[in-house]
Amino acid sequence: MSTSESYGNDLISAFRQGDQEAINSIYHAHFRPLCYFARNLVNNKEEAEDIVVETFIKLLRKRNDFDDLVKIKGFLYAVTRNACLDFLKHSRRKTASHKEIIYLMEKDEDFVQSRIIKAELLNTILEEVESLPPVRRNIFKLIFVEELSTAEIAEKLNITIDTVRVQKARALHSIRANILKKGLLSVLCNMTALLTFLLFV
């Protein structure tokens, strides 16, 4: 048995017993990507976070049903997906975009999987963002988390648009380099289009 497998088994065992450290470990590993996933579906940050919190509560109630981390991850995404679908269906103000997402969530499994992959990749990138210098880190978070444009960031930080573009480009370069150093080439390949796009937002 590998070290990672042994750690996973120990974590599951502690989680099933209600160990707070194990619960926190699983919570912190999945909370942020699940929020990205939910927000991408419901287009509402506060509602997405509420959905994810409720999902973790459901996980805790059923913690004895799980014997590996993969099943926990699958459960979390499935419950979050269903909660997002329920929210959209019962929303009083359904936009055309909401109706399209409801249809895709019900009919196209690839649509849901693509959103899960995107959420996981964004989480990997944002882990790298934490190691950036403060200005670059702040700009990158404004892009990813706040979803602001280059012009909006420049106005918010009282700097020029060119400064935002330069710092963004340097941040992307650092993130690419760190991902390659860690051997996460598949992440880099999957994110190349998105990272390139961000240069021109």
Image (cartoon, helix red, strand yellow):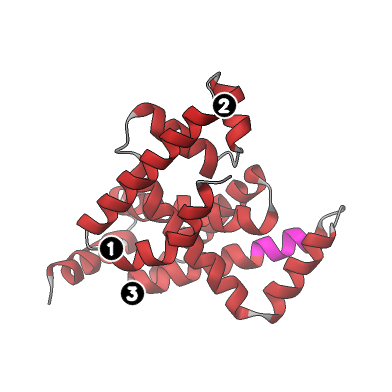
Q: Amino acid at mark 2?
A: Ala
Residue 84 in magenta? yes
Q: Residue at x 85, y 57 (%)?
A: 94
Relative image position of residue 191 (x, y in whole percent): 43, 61
Tag 1 residue: 184
Residue type of the residue flagged with mark 3: Asp
The residue at 65%/62% (across/down) is 83
Q: Which mark is residue 154?
A: 2
Circle nearer the N terminus (3, 1): 3
Asked whether the viewer can see residue 24, the reply is yes
Drawn side of residue 140 relative to residue 176, left or right: right
Q: Which image quarter: residue 107?
A: bottom right
The range drawn in magenta is 83-88
Please name the residue that numbered disc 3 is placed on.
Answer: 67
Q: Give the main secondary structure, helix, strand or loop, of the magenta stretch.
A: helix
Which SS class for mark 3?
A: loop
- SS of the residue under disc 2: helix
Q: Is residue 130 magenta?
A: no
Per the image, label 1 sits on a secondary structure element best described as loop
Dot 2: few (<14), some (14–19), or many (≥20) neighbours within 10 Å? some
Q: CA distance from mark 2 to mark 3?
A: 48 Å
Quarter of the figure with the N terminus: bottom left
